[in-house]
Amino acid sequence: MEIKKVGVVGAGTMGNGIAQVFAQSGFSVVLNDVSDAILDRALAAIGGSMDRMIKKEKMTAADKDAALKRITKSKDLKALADCDIVIEAIIEDFGTKKKMFQDLDAVCKAGAILASNTSSISITKLAACTKRPQNVIGMHFMNPVPMMALAEIVRGIATSDETFKAVDDLAKKVGKTPVETNDYPGFVSNRVLMPMINEACYTLMEGVATRDAIDTVMKLGMAHPMGPLQLADLIGLDVCLSIMEVLYEGFSDSKYRPCPLLKKMVAAGYLGRKTKRGFYTYE
């Protein structure tokens, strides 16, 4: 499989980061979302990210202009019809993703790969919603996508070796380090990370230590670049809760039970950086 044209569905934080790394690497990119306003914000975010790279002398202004010209914005899924791979990066909800994969399966050309950036939802279940399960795979990037080196490449039960190799090679072409995982709840990254964040929430809820104390212990004692509560705010508390619910449902094990404090904060709309308030407050 030779991949030249890439579709990205969902122009939020992850989607615009994915579009950026592919455009910077020379690929033609179709970035899809439901409104011009969302797409314009995404392109502005991509431009701002590239401006920061220019200041750090990691790219030139000419590189930026060339990369932006490789991105086409679209509100119509039919614009993805001739893409060689489409990467879904929409809301972390199975029902919504299922509908998207059915729609993509209907419009994308035969043999095109359908990949999901999901952080925990079953690739096997998503593949079963299509008529091309052998061409469905997980391609889980980390946030912020332009900065983070890892890409979890997740095999569903029906993912073909050819599809895996094409996506593994593709990740390398955009400067990522691909790591193969099999399709179990949370894969590797979030099966390990989210219980730590969840336990930090319990530790705060039970009054074991303050917010700052918990984060300081993990930063200074465990050499983490940021504390688990800071990281939860960066990821989004709603995303953390969603992943914990997938783990809890998938394993039926009480060690994955979402912390009541996490659930309460999400119910209150305190989702972290994106709402200017989570465990911390933001300007």
Image: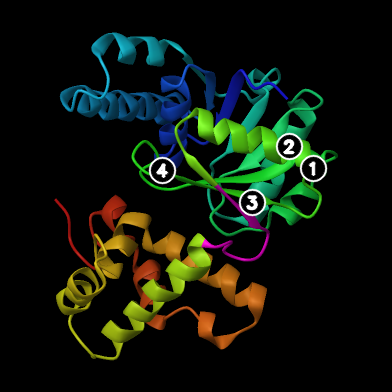
Residue wearing tag 2? 163
For mark 4, give the secondary structure: loop
> In which quadrant is the N terminus drawn?
top right
Residue wearing tag 3? 154
86 with respect to 131 (left or right): left
| Amino acid type at mark 2 | Thr
Most extreme residue toward the right is 131
Q: Residue at x 75, y 26 (%)?
A: 107
- Determine which of the numbered discs, if any, sits on residue 149 in the image: 4
- Determine which of the numbered discs, if any, sits on residue 160 in the image: 1
| Amino acid type at mark 1 | Ser
The mark that comes first in sequence, 4 or 3, is 4
| Amino acid type at mark 3 | Val
| Amino acid type at mark 4 | Ala
Question: Magenta stretch?
Answer: 179-188
Given residues 78 and 217, the one toward you in this image is: 217
* Whether residue 34 is visible: no
* Whether residue 82 is visible: yes
Q: Residue at x 25, y 14 (%)?
A: 60
Label 4 to label 2, Cα distance in Å?
21 Å
x, y (%) of residue 144? 35, 43
